[in-house]
Image: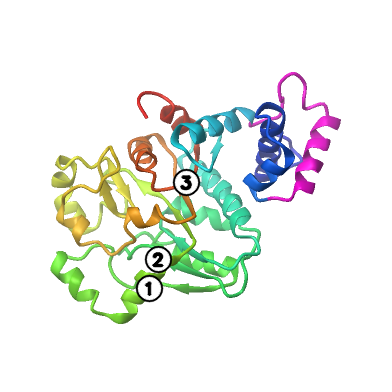
Amino acid sequence: MSENLPFDDELERARVAWLYFIGGQTQQEIAQRMNITRLKVNRIIGEVRETGAVQVNVSLPLTDCVELAEKVSQRYGLADAVVVPDLNDYLDQKRVIGEAAGTVVSQLIEGRGMGVGIGSGRTLSFAVRSLNSRPKPESWVVSLTGGVTSGSATNTFEVATAFARALGVECHYLTAPIYCANPESRNALLLNDELTDVLARTEIADIGIVSCGSLAQDTSLTQIRVVKDNLDTVLKGGAVGEFMGWFLDARGDPIDHFLNESIIALPPDKLKLKPMSVLVSGGIRKIPIIRAVLRAGYVNRLVTNEGVARALLQGPR
């Protein structure tokens, strides 16, 4: 990687060069796909030509990641994908994925008036660091799930607040636990008009920025008492992971379990209807749930790491 360019700039440069010189796309197609100006695309192409970075192959760093992203996009019918290098350190990996996602989101929201739906998790918390654009003032942020009782800075309330502050817009919260004790208590909560109003906002938000998780016993979600007490039955029900708190099987379908009937969160099939939806997640443990989410078509964009991208290209779709 160039010592003179930040990671996000270097990745953007590599993507433009790969799409133009290897992918055969026009400057206008690249500009529309990456939500940048055609003038910027033209400038990047001119720069890489002048520096000799383009020979028979594009010799920029990260071009392997760009190629992987193209293949994953094509296989799963995505509008776009970004793949970052594998890193040995667990938190560094999350940080790099999150920061790359922040750049993607910045390109999608620049100058627009929109509702921005935010999930939870450490990876999403890192995305705030690289948000470098703002939507129109009438825009707003909404948390897509209820909250958990632990996980400072990764809880949906903290992540949504950080996004709203970075974007300079108001924030709306699902001020309820992500899981109720049973479906009846969920129904009772939904008698609150303010809560149902926020749930309605989760559905009309133009973009959803979400993550997913494995069902390992060391995650904040699996430490919630009602989940911890029922994790065995969740696994026996065929769940391969959680997506916005919903427990999904390998096909991406919510499993038949009372927790999926007791959840306060946007349903995955509602996320699927959004014009823009970004899954921000990586790590080997999450491959089954990431594949399930992509199989079901719940999102149209992905930000992940090399190891996950390679795994997604192996075996049946």
| Mark 2 vs mark 1, CA separation in Å | 6 Å
Sort mark 3 into few (<14), some (14-19) or many (20+) by Cα contacts within 10 Å: many
Figure quadrant of the C terminus: top left
Mark toward the start of the polypeptide (1 vs 3): 1
The residue at which mark 2 appears reads as: 202
Nearest to the observer: residue 78 or residue 100: 78
Q: Residue 244, can we see it?
A: no
Q: Is residue 111 left or right of residue 146?
A: right
| Mark 2 vs mark 3, CA separation in Å | 17 Å
The residue at which mark 3 appears reads as: 300
Looking at the rendered image, the disc whose residue lies closer to the viewer, 1 or 3, is: 3
Write the residue at 45% across / 62% down: 117
Q: Please check the rendered image and state whether residue 48 is part of the magenta-colored stretch, yes or no.
A: yes
Please state the horizontal and vertical placement of residue 98, each as a whole percent of the image. Answer: 52, 49
| Mark 1 vs mark 3, CA separation in Å | 24 Å
Above or below — where is 75 with respect to 198?
A: above
Q: Please check the rendered image and state whether residue 208 is part of the magenta-colored stretch, yes or no.
A: no
| Residue type at the position of mark 1 | Val
Sort mark 2 into few (<14), some (14-19) or many (20+) by Cα contacts within 10 Å: many
The residue at which mark 1 appears reads as: 198
